[in-house]
Image (cartoon, rainbow, N blue to C red):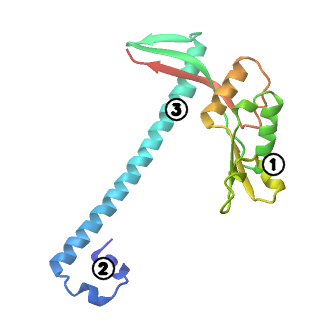
Amino acid sequence: MTDEDVWSAIDADASLFEGLTTEGGGELSDLIRQVVGVEKTVAKVEEELKSLKKRRDSYLFDLIPAKMQEVGMDKVVVEGHTVSLSTFVSGTLPKDPIQRDVAFSHLRDIGCSDFIKNEVKVSFGVKEDNMAKSVQADLEEQGHDTTAKTWVEPMTLKKLLRERVENNEEIDLEIFNAHIGTVAKIKGA
């Protein structure tokens, strides 16, 4: 961005610049160029970090587990680092509200409703404090608008899926877009 670009991009009252000197304008321009440069550097470093994480995951989730399984190992020590294989399961609740309800119904059907969180919010007017203590169904019957939020914490869902898979218990992995694989876990010396 040139000085001309900066000044042409500024849409302001000319009287605001009466006290601005050439030196002050140059300093301002330099500061703007510097922050633009820093923003570009941050974006570049973030992209490099993203690439490095993808590369690391390739080693941990693909290359190392495949090689260890190929040679028949599930644990090895290399230069003081213990590398062991373990199963991972990942999954998410569907974003589509209908599919999300199907997922919650499935969890309830297989006896996992304890993992479902609920939040009910109700707005009350003045002098309705006692009514606030009633259950959501009572409030809806009385004509109050209520909203409810239902969810499972992501880490809780991951743990639930992993445990049910490991214990050969019923769970519909497709509903949760679940993935099962092997990961190499490395612990330092």
Which residue carries the number 2 mark?
4
Q: Position of residue 24 (x, y in %)?
A: 18, 76
- Foreground label between 1 and 3: 1
* CB within 8 Å, label 2 to label 1: no
SS under mark 3:
helix
Q: Earlier in the sequence, mark 1 or mark 3?
A: 3
Q: Earlier in the sequence, mark 3 or mark 2?
A: 2
Q: Position of residue 109 (x, y in %)?
A: 83, 31
Q: Nearer the viewer, residue 120 or 96?
A: 120
Q: Nearer the viewer, residue 143 or 111?
A: 143
- Foreground label between 2 and 1: 1
Which residue carries the number 3 mark?
57
How far apart are the alpha carbons under marks 3 and 2?
45 Å
* Marking on residue 124: none
Left or right: 46, with 89 as reference point: left
Which residue carries the number 1 mark?
137
Q: Which residue is found at the position 46% from the left and 20% from the top?
A: 186
